Image (spheres, coloured by chain):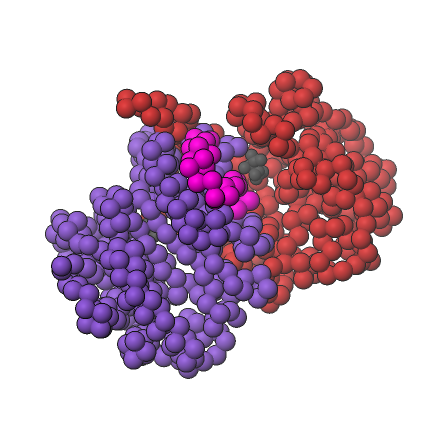
Chain colours: A red, B purple
Amino acid sequence: MSRNVLLLPGDGIGPEIVAEAEKVLNKVNDQFNLGLTFDKALVGGAAIDATDSPLPDETLEKARNADAILLGAVGGPQWDSLPMAKRPEKGLLGLRSNLQLFANLRPAILYPQLASASSLKPEVVSGLDILIVRELTGGIYFGQPRGVRELENGERQGYNTYQYTESEIRRIGRVAFEAAQQRGKKLCSVDKANVLEVTVLWREVMEDLKREYPDVELSHMYVDNAAMQLVRAPKQFDVIVTGNMFGDILSDEAAMLTGSIGMLPSASLNSEKQGMYEPCHGSAPDIAGQGIANPLATIISAAMMLRYSLNEEKAAEAIEAAVSKVLDQGLRTADIMSDGGKKVSTREMGEAVLNAL
Amino acid sequence: MSRNVLLLPGDGIGPEIVAEAEKVLNKVNDQFNLGLTFDKALVGGAAIDATDSPLPDETLEKARNADAILLGAVGGPQWDSLPMAKRPEKGLLGLRSNLQLFANLRPAILYPQLASASSLKPEVVSGLDILIVRELTGGIYFGQPRGVRELENGERQGYNTYQYTESEIRRIGRVAFEAAQQRGKKLCSVDKANVLEVTVLWREVMEDLKREYPDVELSHMYVDNAAMQLVRAPKQFDVIVTGNMFGDILSDEAAMLTGSIGMLPSASLNSEKQGMYEPCHGSAPDIAGQGIANPLATIISAAMMLRYSLNEEKAAEAIEAAVSKVLDQGLRTADIMSDGGKKVSTREMGEAVLNAL
Ligand SMILES: CC(C)[C@H](C(=O)O)[C@@H](O)C(=O)O
Ligand SMILES: CC(C)[C@H](C(=O)O)[C@@H](O)C(=O)O
């Protein structure tokens, strides 16, 4: 059985961090006899420069045929003035939507070795372990109609549509309830049901689903309150489920509670568990090419890929253990130096993980 | 010259905290010879119970004729199952929209006396002083069409519309640029211009306005990044301007950085500087009627009202100085007890402010 992994380095620090994750994947491929084959393709700004499209047909084709995808990051200032349809982000959004990767899992975990990196007090975040389940192929990101129109009085109006069907809500709800079952059995659904009709439906469907998961305790929270509670007492949460836009905001806020966004992976899955895996952080154009980016979020994303899409739990655990070991050894890239340690480059960090394997 | 202030106690702890602010207003009215007259009306759940409407005509009429409005808070679990059009929140939203109170000013200030209440490390938040300018009468809160419809396949779809015209963006932009001119001269406009067309227009109009305010440094930030940066390094911000929904989320997040949401006021102004003033916190039904709520956010909101809508800077400063004094005296309601002090009730806190005046 041969399974294909597609690597999409993308822009900015993307190529540097994916290169390290690739080495790690190669090593566990041999060690555990996984039978993985690897391919590579262009996406985002790199694809725009080469083909004039952020998501070339060839890339989409390869992505459809891959068993799993590992993405670096997309975007950068040199493409910021392009019209929206031609921007690097459209490559990412196009992959999500074409492959129907509706379930975005974003853990916010505080690594004990990096506890002091957080801007929050230690007692507020120590042991933090939240999973945010974000709907990724619907909501206001993809709603139609959208655009900028001219009104009768001659002025322009921008407009977007926020929408969810019952079945879209139900399928992401199931993913979240199931994740909660395997964790602390607490699910908090975040909406704005006191103002937005679409989230009234959201809340109704979540309530409905609850009956199928009697072992999970479901609560509801307005998004403004959730943004507060994440700052005030983040450990009250186990699993959070929410729509695309609220999930974008809250998952970044939650990630930053750990102070180490360079450590956080993410998974985007479809109903066949085919998935795209990427670090939570962006393309960091300001430090691209300097060899100082933190490859660990991408390496941990590769571990997530082995676990969720390739069913290789042992290999996933080996990678995670290796990462933990290099942290214990005190090795730190620049972004996680706040509590001291030995400063290493992107490549040195990758090598250290290889050696720890 | 007699000017009329309308008091809207509302629900939950609303009546208790507005009662204390009313005493404070009465005192400065005498001391500074302000010539204020006061009236009272029902809004929110209290109005639903009495009249079946969250915003009775009589209340709206009084609000239109008032020079300024002081609101407690609306909402509570007993009204949560009502259809959206009949909920307490509609009273608040109806006032905002009928009076065209488009400019919502939400300061997030850390009181030095309460520094330890924050869940963030002292060095991250000490001296924090951010102003969030939130558009309050447009965006997805009021966009049409909205509702829940049945699709051809028989399933339901919820939908809302996010929209802004150039002139709506321009008028809130001007408020924000002017506020920045009077503060640190730094304005950060928050959008999601890499995904949402309406915020592409938002960014364009802000860029356009910049030319009229050459002394203000304008920057742009995506909303997900803003949610992160508020946690990571909130002191990088001076004034933030954003739309209704993002402003709802970010202003609550920013307020919670201080750890003392019971201290934070807000103002909602229209183009005639008529305004509605209210604490940032909600109606806190869990502690309503117990006499333990913190009245200071409402009292400070009354000070803001004197400053912005009634042009009584001296009286405003007197109230703020009195609040500072009671904090220096170590008086604390339950919500701000984390660093010790003498625990007082709602009424005792109100009395202490009166005595300090
Ligand atoms: C790059 C951008 C389109 C994307 C999003 O908003 O979804 C990113 O912020 C993310 O969260 O993956
Ligand atoms: C009560 C609710 C409708 C309101 C809002 O969302 O605007 C509140 O959260 C606020 O921020 O004033």
Seen in the picture, residue B342 relative to A326 is either above or below; the reply is below
Question: Magenta segment range?
Answer: B200-226
Measured from the top left, where is residue B310 in percent x and y?
24, 57
Residue B209 is one of the magenta-drawn residues: yes
Residue at 62% over, 20% down: A53
Quarter-wise, where is residue A354 in the image?
A: top right
Residue at 69% over, 30% down: A10
Left or right: where A24 falls relative to B245: right
Report the number of numbered marks: 0
Measured from the top left, where is residue B45 in percent x and y?
23, 56
Measured from the top left, where is residue A115 in percent x and y?
67, 61
Residue at 39% over, 29% down: A158
Quarter-wise, where is residue B344 in the image?
A: bottom left
Quarter-wise, where is residue A29 in the image?
A: top right
Residue at 63% over, 18% down: A52
Measured from the top left, where is residue B339 in percent x and y?
50, 76
Seen in the picture, residue B325 relative to A62 is either above or below; the reply is below
Q: Nearer the viewer, residue B309 or A217?
A: B309
Q: Nearer the viewer, residue B29 or B162?
A: B29
Left or right: where A87 falls relative to B313: right
Seen in the picture, residue A90 relative to B307 is either above or below; the reply is above
Residue B216 is one of the magenta-drawn residues: yes
